[in-house]
Amino acid sequence: TDRTLVLVKPDGVARGLVGEVVSRLEAKGLRLVAAELRTLTREVAEEHYGEHREKPFFGSLVEFITGGPLLALVVEGPRAVEAFRALAGATDPVKAAPGTIRGDFALEVQSNIVHGSDSAESAAREIGLFFPDLAA
Ligand code: GTP
Ligand code: MG
């Protein structure tokens, strides 16, 4: 089985969508391995989103993701990375299909409720960053 890092981003926590996200991934058959509510430091946020460092929205993204508590989860199951990305929907919530988390609950590309690792390599890196005790 595979593992992935899921975040309920600060917008999702502030809007009371933690239960909704957790219940959708549990209903799908994914299993929780770790969970922690925390507010990211700028350093961890910049490391987590390092691939976007040169993007015009990087500063705004770091402000957003550090702007309040988020829920960090490690989730496990067959093809967990792909399975959670399917539940989350497209990055732009207006394009995300209804029935997905972003498609059902968001309108703006930055405040799109959840993060899910985009590959096995990203998952290993991100799990190591958020939960060093679980590093493979
Ligand atoms: P994550 O799971 O959060 O990594 O989303 P993703 O993999 O679907 O998208 P990507 O990695 O390309 O972008 C990371 C995050 O940056 C997105 O989820 C948004 O929160 C934000 N983002 C992406 N594109 C834009 C943009 O054009 N403008 C702004 N303001 N934010 C963006
Ligand atoms: Mg991404």
Image (cartoon, rainbow, N blue to C red):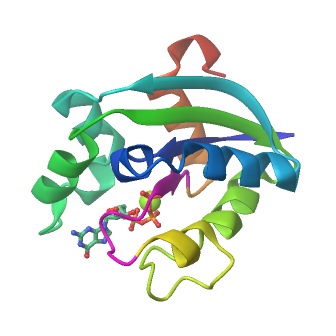
Query: Which residue corresponds to the image point at 17% horizontal and 33% vertical from the top-left?
Result: 42
Extreme-front residue of the structure? 16
How far across and how far down the image is residue 44, in percent?
28, 30
Find ligand 2 in the image and state its quadrant. bottom left
On the image, which quarter does residue 10 sit in?
A: top left
Residue 31 location in percent, x, y? 81, 36
The C terminus lies in quadrant: top right
Q: Nearer the viewer, residue 121 or 109?
A: 109
Q: Is residue 95 left or right of residue 19?
A: left
Image quadrant holding the N terminus, namely: top right
Residue 115 lies in the magenta stretch: yes
Determine whether, in the image, residue 36 is placed left or right of residue 33.
Answer: left
Range of magenta residues: 107-117
Q: Is residue 5 above or below residue 36?
A: below
Tell me if 130 is positioned left or right of 73 in this view.
left
Q: Position of residue 94 (x, y in %)?
A: 44, 86
Q: In this view of the protein, which residue sits in the foreground, 54 or 90?
A: 90
| Image coords of residue 104 (percent x, y) | 57, 75
Specify whether residue 42 is painted magenta: no
Total of numbered circles in the picture?
0
Residue 30 occupies which quadrant of the picture?
A: top right
Q: Tell me what residue is drawn at x 43 percent, y 72 percent.
A: 106
Judge by depth and name the residue closer to the eye, 33 or 67: 67
Q: Residue at x 69, y 65 (%)?
A: 87
State the residue in front, 94 or 3.
94
Extreme bottom residue here?
95
Residue 104 in the image: above or below residue 79: below
Which residue is painted at 55% across and 51% down in the image? 117
